[in-house]
Amino acid sequence: MATQVNIAECVPFLIVKNIKKTIDWYEKIGFKCTATNLIWEPDCELNWARIEWYGAAFMIGPDERKDVPNSKDSGLWFNVQSVDEMAKFLNQECISFDTEDETFYGRKVISFKDIDGFTVSFSSELPKK
């Protein structure tokens, strides 16, 4: 029988080409870098960062492979109250995105690719009819 474990948090970890550029890109669209290894190891090379958006978080680390595939097998999904504000902001920043006005499961979704090719989606419930 499995031991019961209380999970406090699950934080996705994405491997990126350039941590600093990825931090800058996400901060430009309203995310915040809340931690890096440089807090505890100021004389070391930047090798991970935690990025947050209104309580949701993910981490990034360096991809040290020589041949990095262009397609990504993972992405980020944020459930929000309304995607419309994010859509306005992305338009202001000239970041193109796709919109699905009504999914079969009753949500509106906007999706875009980040600087590393990961799909980032924001989803909100449609108003009840």
Image (cartoon, grey):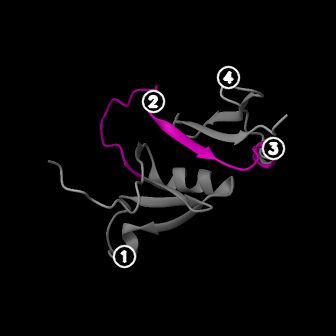
Residue at 45% in and 34% down: 74
Instruction: Tell us which disc is closer to us: 3 or 2.
Output: 3
Left or right of 98? Residue 120 is left
Instruction: Tell us which disc is closer to us: 4 or 1.
Output: 4
Residue at 75% in and 43% down: 83
For residue 72, the mark is 2
Dot 1 crowding, Cα within 10 Å, few <14, some 14–19, many 20+: few
87 in magenta? yes
Q: Could you tell me which secondary element the residue under label 3 belongs to?
A: helix
Quadrant where the C terminus sits is top right
Whichever of callouts 3 and 4 sits on the residue coming sooner in the sequence is 3
Dot 2 crowding, Cα within 10 Å, few <14, some 14–19, many 20+: few
Residues tagged 2 and 4 counted as in contact (Cβ below 8 A): no
- How far apart marks 2 and 4 lie (CA) works out to 25 Å
How far from the left and from the top, in percent, is residue 71?
46, 25
Whichever of callouts 1 and 3 sits on the residue coming sooner in the sequence is 1
**Of residues 107 and 51, which is closer to you in this image?**
107
Q: Could you tell me which secondary element the residue under label 4 belongs to?
A: loop
The residue under label 2 is which amino acid type?
A: Lys
How far from the left and from the top, in percent, is residue 13?
39, 49
Going by the picture, which residue comes out furthest to the top?
104
In the rendered structure, which segment of residues is drawn in magenta? 60-88
- How far apart marks 2 and 1 lie (CA) works out to 31 Å
Whichever of callouts 3 and 2 sits on the residue coming sooner in the sequence is 2
How far from the left and from the top, in percent, is residue 105?
65, 28
For residue 104, the mark is 4
- How far apart marks 4 and 1 lie (CA) works out to 49 Å
For residue 42, the mark is 1
Residues tagged 1 and 3 counted as in contact (Cβ below 8 A): no
Whichever of callouts 2 and 4 sits on the residue coming sooner in the sequence is 2
Q: Which residue is mark 3?
A: 84
